Amino acid sequence: MPQFDDLVAGVYRDLADESEAVFSRLQVEDFIRGGIADLNRVAPTDTIDDIDFVLDPDTGAIMAYEYATVIELPYRVETIRLSDGWGEVIPEIDSGQAQSTGFHFRQSPDGGIIAFPKWWLAQMDAAVWGIRLYGYAARPLPYTVDGEPSPQVSLSQNDEYSVRAYAKSAGFDLLAHDRSLFGQWQGQSNNTDVSPTQMLQMAAGAKQEWDRHRGLIRVVRRYW
């Protein structure tokens, strides 16, 4: 996984602004976060999340019936026997249905919230059984704070290429439509041989490259 600072430096190189004289650090960071957000829409990560039950310290009984998860769209929820990993699917309760066994799921800003009938979860032995979610989760957006080391970004090599392609497209599009910024880029980044027409072509080429790659990485989501 790349360091955020290394990813920022890579985008500056892609934008032919290695001296960092034209694009501000905040602009480049926003390009990167925009790329990760778009990557999450196109190709969220297939994730497994085990629920960490809240237990009564004296009796070991399950005390909470609603849990947060990083998964924002589950395609399978199971009870898991801890001894051997054997699983059985838990159905989703339809809205308004008076079914006693199953779960309700709703999205949250950080993923999702899954809830179970109190009577059903209360009778489960947490020493024998667990609950496992399979689904799609978003990659976290990186942020830096002055004085702190650069955080790692949860991106594979292919993910990093995707984010940089998005950032390059966004940066070139800004140059193509902001004549003042383009003038700075020509002079301060030693790109005086690039004309406004060429810049439009470069922006269109970067967008086409991102659109092509976007289609290749798109994830067809699984459902029940």
Image (cartoon, rainbow, N blue to C red):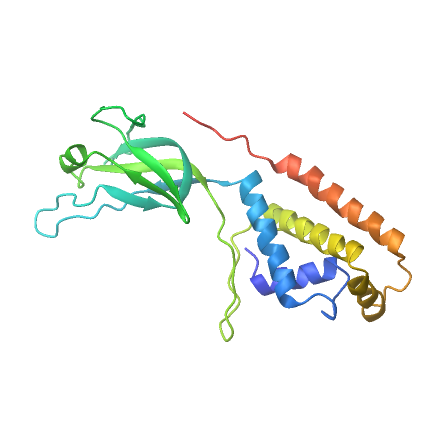
**Residue 212 in picture, x, y percent from top left:** 71, 38
- Of residue 125 and residue 199, the one placed in the foreground of this image is 199
Residue at image position (61%, 50%) is 35
Q: Quadrant of the N terminus?
A: bottom right
Q: Quadrant of the C terminus?
A: top left
- Of residue 9 and residue 1, the one placed in the foreground of this image is 9
Residue 42 in the figure: left or right of residue 21: left
**Residue 63 in picture, x, y percent from top left:** 16, 45
Task: Name the quadrant containing residue 18.
Answer: bottom right
- Of residue 88 and residue 145, the one placed in the foreground of this image is 145
Tell me: residue 101, above or below residue 174: above
Any part of residue 97 in sight: yes
Tell me: residue 51, above or below residue 32: above
Residue 65 in the figure: left or right of residue 12: left
Task: Name the quadrant containing residue 64.
Answer: top left
**Residue 12 in picture, x, y percent from top left:** 70, 62
Task: Name the quadrant containing residue 80.
Answer: top left
Q: How many marks?
A: 0
**Residue 214 in picture, x, y percent from top left:** 65, 39
Residue at image position (51%, 63%) is 151
In the current view of this chain or complex, which residue is farthest to the left? 58
- Of residue 184 and residue 43, the one placed in the foreground of this image is 184
Residue at image position (85%, 69%) is 187
Any part of residue 82 in sight: no
Tell me: residue 58, above or below residue 190: above
Residue 111 in the figure: left or right of residue 38: left
Residue at image position (76%, 54%) is 172
